[in-house]
Image: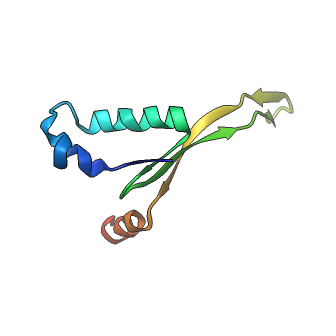
Amino acid sequence: MKIVNPRLYTFGPLKQNKNLDGQSMATDIVNILVNRGAVKVSGLGIFKIVKCKPRGNRTLNGRTFYIKGYNKIKFTQTEALRDNIQKYGN
């Protein structure tokens, strides 16, 4: 799992490169997700790609239709982030 530190985009040696911003950080996270399947962002949480299996479903009329399998992104937040959201979110 690759660890990305969002603070590097505003502080430290990467600050000299003016092209680094939130958009480039999001692009980096997406690239790592595609290549490795998971990425941990310090201070935020873990992003993972989860595969959803194809499944059948029925309409109210009783007709059966099928939903294709797909990939989705799952986010698990850190405890500190969850606590801050609960404390300051309201």
Q: Is residue 73 left or right of residue 17?
A: right
Q: Is residue 74 above or below residue 65?
A: below
Q: Residue at x 41, y 38 (%)?
A: 29
**Image x and y of residue 44, in percent:** 39, 55
Quarter of the image with the C terminus in it: bottom left
Q: Residue at x 44, y 34 (%)?
A: 30
Q: Residue furthest front?
A: 13
**Image x and y of residue 86, in percent:** 38, 69
**Image x and y of residue 81, in percent:** 38, 63
Q: Is residue 89 above or below residue 2?
A: below
Image quadrant where residue 79 sits: bottom left
Q: How is the image coloured?
A: rainbow
Q: Nearer the viewer, residue 2 or 44?
A: 2
Q: Is residue 71 left or right of residue 47?
A: right
**Image x and y of residue 64, in percent:** 84, 29
Q: Nearer the viewer, residue 82 or 43?
A: 43
Q: Is residue 66 left or right of residue 74?
A: right
Q: Is residue 29 above or below residue 64?
A: below
